[in-house]
Image (spheres, rainbow, N blue to C red):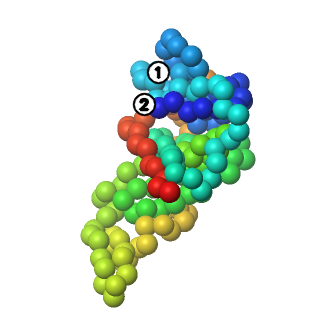
Amino acid sequence: MTLSVTDLDRAGAFWTGVIGFVRRPDQGPGLALGTIDRTLVVLSPGATRPVARGHAGMHHVAFGMPSQAEFSRRMLRFLELGIPFSPVDHLMSKALYLDDPDGHGIEIAWETPERFGRFSDAGGRFALVDAAGRPHSGRERLTEIPGSDVLTGTDPAGVTLTLSPLRDIHLNENAA
């Protein structure tokens, strides 16, 4: 995934210092970032302005965490750094939505299929039903704030955080 950025140094600092990616040795233009084992994003300089909203194109890029603990560490990291984000409970997953300095949407997700029961359209309204039979919109605010007990390890910036390989990546697009 290549993202055009207006300021490569600023974008690189965000993706390493906030998201927790590491610099990759990949050759070529731009800055390759990801996990120790895999390049996930290449930041390419040259954008003349941030991402324009309301147009066809990428809505956000999503990265799946390998565990609830890793997901929680990212949430705590954003809180500690004062980074604005939207925590959403999709029932089948938990998600943190935020933007990089150029307005590229980012989703950090933890899949939770064990909480999902079934889909419902009772009364003409779509709903997700959890494993206990309770309806959900799939857009509720995630209210669980992890405790500091999830913090172990050290990231490259020296802030307590374990950097594990991300489980998956997907791209959501806007249609005009």
Please identify the residue farthest to the bottom as the structure is shown.
Answer: 123
Of residues 106 and 172, which is closer to you in this image? 172
One can see residue 159 in this view: no
Image quadrant assignment for residue 80: top right
Image quadrant assignment for residue 118: bottom left
Residue 174 location in percent, x, y?
A: 49, 53
Write the residue at 59% across / 56% down. 54
Q: Residues within 10 Å of mark 1 (few under 14, many from 20)?
A: some
Residue located beneath label 1 in the image: 36
Q: Is residue 102 left or right of residue 139?
A: right
Of residues 68 and 19, which is closer to you in this image? 19
Judged from the image, the secondary structure of the residue bearing numbered disc 1 is loop
One can see residue 4 in this view: yes
Write the residue at 51% across / 47% down. 57
Amino acid tagged 2: Pro
Q: Mark 1 near mark 2, Cβ–Cβ under 8 Å? A: yes
Judged from the image, the secondary structure of the residue bearing numbered disc 2 is loop
- Compared to residue 19, the image places residue 140 above or below, namely below
Write the residue at 34% across / 85% down. 124
Q: Is residue 93 left or right of residue 80?
A: left
Image quadrant assignment for residue 81: top right
Residue 111 location in percent, x, y?
A: 37, 51
Q: Is residue 102 left or right of residue 161?
A: right
Residue 151 location in percent, x, y?
A: 56, 39
Residue located beneath label 2 in the image: 165
Amino acid tagged 1: Ile
Write the residue at 38% across / 37% down. 167
